[in-house]
Amino acid sequence: MREKLLEIKNLSVIYSTEGKIVEAVNHISLDLYKGEAIGLIGETGAGKTTTALSVLNLIPNPPGKIISGEILFEGENILEMDHKNLRKMRGNKISMIFQDPMTALNPVMTVGDQIAEVVRLHDKASRKDAFIKAQQMLETVGIPGNRMHDYPHQFSGGMKQRVVIAISLACNPALLIADEPTTALDVTIQEQVLELMETLQKDFNTSLLLITHDLGVVAEVCKRVAIMYAGEIVEQGTLEQVYNHTAHPYTVGLFNSIPNFHEDVRRLKPIVGQMPDPAALPKGCHFAARCPDVMDKCLEKSPPIINLNDEHTVKCYKYVGQEGAE
Amino acid sequence: MSENVIKIKHRNASMLRGVLIRLLRNKAAIIGLVIILVLIFSAIFAEVVSPYAYDEQNLRDRFLAPSTAHIFGTDSYGRDIFSRIVFGSRTSLMVGAIAVTISSIIGTFLGAISGYYGNRVDNIIMRFIDVMLAIPNILLAISIAATLGPGIVNVMIAVGISSVPGYARLVRASVMSIREQEFIEAARSIGASDFRIIMRHILPNCFAPIIVQATMSVAIAILSAAALSFLGLGVQPPTPEWGSMLSDGRSYIRDYWWVVTFPGLAIMATVFAFNLFGDGLRDALDPRLKQ
């Protein structure tokens, strides 16, 4: 029996600025099991990072606010924890890798200090032990230990991301959230970092929530996938189900927009239209305006979530009556 | 194990050495440092350095021009100006250093709290600072000194408090810009407390402007202290103080130029030295400027 590590239930997050209310995340639910890697895919502004920050209860407030839902981590609701317990949890049980390694490290602290800091915050280790641990962590991510006395600006982008990974794994967290960890890196370094994350995730038996807009990256690392669109999870399932038995029209559109190497393609096939303004979301299905299979009821009411089988769910009217079809 | 301990020690040593090496490579900073060291030396060993006692009056030798006996000449009471300048460096340096310490500690504290927490806290602190800023600096210092009564300690407090707003605003602005950086969010995501984030992550990143402000305000503090002394609210005679020497000699400037020139040069050299050194220190302390 797989053990649930993280349960996001019916989470909604809004940002309110100058009278405008932006509904960044709308009633999403997501489960993550121990030792599992799940990919959260969506375009810019779909609410991926907001979801990730909610898990750490780090939504900047104001302007952000979690208006409904609960996030259970090992059975405890993170959204109701007090500051002290939150601090104990952050970096220790749940840690996060940020998008841009160039800005995620403190420029005036040595990398050794920064890795040692998280160790000292959580393990009550002595200064000496923390530094030894920091050195080990650096070596784990493939950086020579003697470079721990260097400052972040003395490292390349890929190495900085390795340092960030070392910091996030130093306390052996149960859950690692990686928010577009490879977006700021070039393709070869991206490959190295992904490989490293994959190996470490298995070695440390850490669960991984990988946030990205790169379908290829997810295919490489994750077993399960969730597709986000305008603050909603529109499709969710195993890699095989989502990639090979794609159900939701948005996901279909995403795959169609990937150029095919076997054909001579002159133009890309984008999904027509723009994502709706999150401050004025349509009443019905958020994707309705761009959907090739749009029906009248799509514009009226938000579609239900339909279980195509145990794991594969899709939020679309097209599949009404096909519960358990696969 | 022991190898690792050595490495940790080595780290601190090498960090300090790096700063020193970069500082010493800067010629302007060296000039500043030398002048400051000379001043500190003469302040500590004033009795040894000065040929006369600072309050030794000799009315027969009034207004002697600079000569081998009195290299900076004598003043209206026949006191040796060089000796008085040497002793005056004690007062001036002490006033400068302590006033700056007071204002930088209070100002950094207020600015950091205000910039980090924002909103209401920020509003309350900043409106208070605005009120202080509305009163001219020297007027504020005069009123504080007048309330507390004359004396060197009160001068330091008055000058210190009156330059708090500058620090508070400066630190607040830097904290606000650094607070938005991703590494602060990263620090929060590893479970660091607010206090730790301010002390370890934000303030070290604001170091450069604070240091520049501190060196500039040593100079300003010395000048403000001089102004207070001139008004009779500062250092009481016969204790020598550059500012009061300057104002005492003011009326003789047409006939006896040396009475005002040398204390003026002393103030100028000190201000100049602190500015040069402060700039050099800023460049040396900021690892982002490392080659």
Image: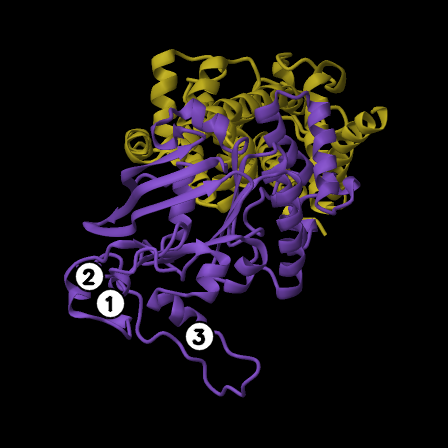
Amino acid type at mark 2: Pro
The alpha-carbon separation of the residues under discs 3 and 2 comes to: 24 Å
Amino acid type at mark 1: Ala
Instruction: Tell me the number on the disc at residue A257.
Output: 3
- Disc 2, SS: loop
Give the residue number, with chain letter if any, for mark 1: A288
Q: Does A109 appear above or below B98?
A: below
Asked if one can make out residue A308 in the rendered structure from this viewpoint, the answer is yes
Q: Nearer the viewer, mark 3 or mark 2?
A: 3
Look at the numbered discs 2 and 1 and tell me whether their residues touch, using CB distance below 8 Å. Answer: yes
Where in the figure is residue A291, as x and y percent of width and height? 28, 71
Amino acid type at mark 3: Ser
Q: Earlier in the sequence, mark 3 or mark 2?
A: 3
Within 10 Å of disc 2 (Cα), the crowding (few <14, some 14-19, many 20+) is: some
Where in the figure is residue A308, as x and y percent of width and height? 35, 57
- Disc 3, SS: loop
The answer to whether dots 1 and 3 both sit on one chain is yes
Within 10 Å of disc 3 (Cα), the crowding (few <14, some 14-19, many 20+) is: some
Chain letter of disc 3 in the image: A
Chain (yellow): B
Q: Does A277 appear above or below A27?
A: below
- Disc 1, SS: helix
Q: Earlier in the sequence, mark 1 or mark 3?
A: 3
Asked if one can make out residue B193 in the rendered structure from this viewpoint, the answer is no
The alpha-carbon separation of the residues under discs 1 and 3 comes to: 18 Å
The answer to whether dots 2 and 1 both sit on one chain is yes
Colour in which chain A is drawn: purple
